[in-house]
Image (tube, grey):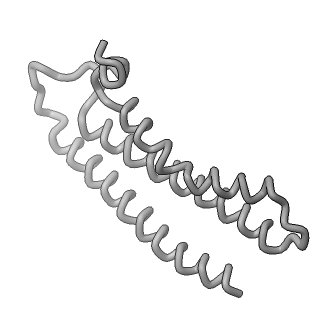
Amino acid sequence: FMVILSFSHDATFISIMVWTSVSMVLLLHRHHQCTQHILTANQNHRGHAETRAAHTILMLVVTFVSLYILNFICVIFHTFLMDSRIWLRHVNEVLTAGFPTISPFLLIFRDPKDPCSVLFNC
């Protein structure tokens, strides 16, 4: 019962996070459509800033929700299996630490500059 109660609490806030992220992506898309006719001399070859921002938002949200769902499945298995397996606990810990560990690297490699220069000052 506590697992379901905890999941409903998490599901509420995850749905709010997904809703706000999709709203931001739609707002960026609408802004890009409105300003598409404006051409700048220094247009970045990797695309418009709105498109890059929307892709970054979607990438972070999909990563977070995927890791959360995998973590939740792991918690369900850990809760309902009578013999508590140590490897399941380790997988749960890795999944819990996954997003805070991965997200900075995702943001670094989404940098419009060369990722090598961000990491190693090349």
Give the vertical position of 115 relative to 76 (above or below): above
Residue at 49 percent of width and 45 percent of height: 101
Q: Seen from this angle, which residue lies furthest front?
A: 86
Viewer-side residue, 37 vs 96: 96
Left of 2 or right of it: where is 108?
left
Residue at 46 percent of width and 53 percent of height: 61
Left of 40 or right of it: where is 116?
right
Viewer-side residue, 95 vs 26: 95
Left of 98 or right of it: where is 38?
left
Q: x, y (%) of residue 94?
A: 63, 50
Give the vertical position of 17 relative to 56 (above or below): below
Residue at 40 percent of width and 41 percent of height: 104
Give the vertical position of 48 relative to 14 (above or below): above
Q: x, y (%) of residue 53?
A: 30, 42
Residue at 34 percent of width and 44 percent of height: 54
Q: Seen from this angle, which residue lies furthest bottom?
A: 1
Quarter of the image with the N terminus is bottom right
Q: x, y (%) of residue 70?
A: 67, 56
Left of 112 or right of it: where is 7?
right
Quarter of the image with the C terminus is top left
Q: Seen from this angle, which residue lies furthest top?
A: 122
Viewer-side residue, 12 vs 81: 81
How many badges with numbers are in the image?
Answer: 0
Q: x, y (%) of residue 55?
A: 39, 41
